[in-house]
Image (tube, grey):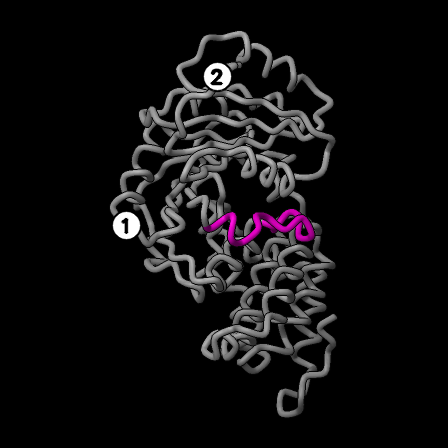
Amino acid sequence: MSFFLRPEPTVSVVIPAYNCDRYLAEAIDSVLCQTEQDYELIVIDDGSTDRTQQILQTYRNQSLNIDLRTVCQPNQGVAIARNHGIELARGKWIAFLDADDVFLPDKLAAQVAIAQANSDVGIVHSGWQRINATGEILMQVEPWQQIPTLDLESWLRWKPVLPSAMLFRRDWLDRAGGFDPRFPPAEDTELVLRLARMGCRSIWLPQVTVRYRQHENSAMHQGLPQARSLAAVIDYFFTQPDLPPAIRHLESQIRYSTLIWTAWYLHHTGHAAEMSRTLQKAWKLSPYPPIETIVHWADCFASYAQNWGIDFDAQALAVSAEWQTLSKWVLNQNNSSPKSIALD
């Protein structure tokens, strides 16, 4: 580790790490191989109990061309770890890299170039590759194909948030106050919604820049915590008193679509009973009559699975006990009277 820091860099890369020694060296190496030369790297060890410190020591012992700083703190969660990195960062721009993800070589250079060409932009987003635990590419994700504009409405509707694929202007992170630790593991979505509500402008770099790893310990495999966190983020968002009227008008639509995505996610992660309860909540907000609602849910499940590169067995879903019971429940509802199921 350098005793004397170089002049202020353009980009600060922050890696929060917690018990991720299996992948950490690959993540760090992907930063060290960047074609962009004007950056620093900050690794926050969030109280790991594995070999994280031994791995970091190997980099401290090397003579590197960049400033590398490593910090160990008691385990407090990824939000506080990232916020610690923001506090230490000296760059005008901040790039986050989860310890199990991998930057492609020109990630920083390409995003810095588009950021410098758009002085009013606070977030530069990009595409990603989904990879499995061993690094095999599962699919390319190019969200700009479906979501060409990143404004508050599109963030709310689609939530295409992946911190490792994004570049943030430091000033905006400071103004927003960083990540809110009340919403793990959806604190990244809450931050982006907060930034958009504050007026932070986001644009696409239409390029795949990162490999996003899917494995048994990743955030997107947390099942119930992920679903509950996303619901809490949406609830909190709509409690804000200063929402634009056009956004306030979309509340039922946003809640409905979020519940359907959450139900699919619960189905995908093996929580059938919770899926059913979530769709019962969605029924209260459905703009369709009973049969069309059921068909719409199934179509959405198929679409979400396709977007994730996952095989979807519609027949298996249709004959499952939970779906059969749910369908009968929906068909027994009187669509001409108010839907009464509680949303809590």
Say above or below: 282 vs 23.
below
Residue 175 percent coordinates (x, y): 51, 53
Label 2 or label 1, whichever comes before in sequence order: 2
Does residue 132 show up? no
Q: Is residue 323 magenta?
A: no
Q: Amino acid at mark 2?
A: Phe
Query: Which residue occupies the foreground of this view, 133 or 124?
Result: 124
Q: Which residue is mark 1?
A: 118
Magenta residues: mostly which secondary structure?
A: loop
Q: Residues within 10 Å of mark 2 (few under 14, many from 20)?
A: few
The residue positioned 63% from the left and 43% from the top of the image is: 79
Q: Is residue 181 magenta?
A: yes
Quick one: SS at disc 1? loop
* Residue most extreme to the left: 117
Q: Which residues are magenta?
A: 172-187
Residue 93's tag is none
Quick one: SS at disc 2? loop
Q: Residues within 10 Å of mark 1 (few under 14, many from 20)?
A: few
Q: Which residue is mark 2?
A: 4
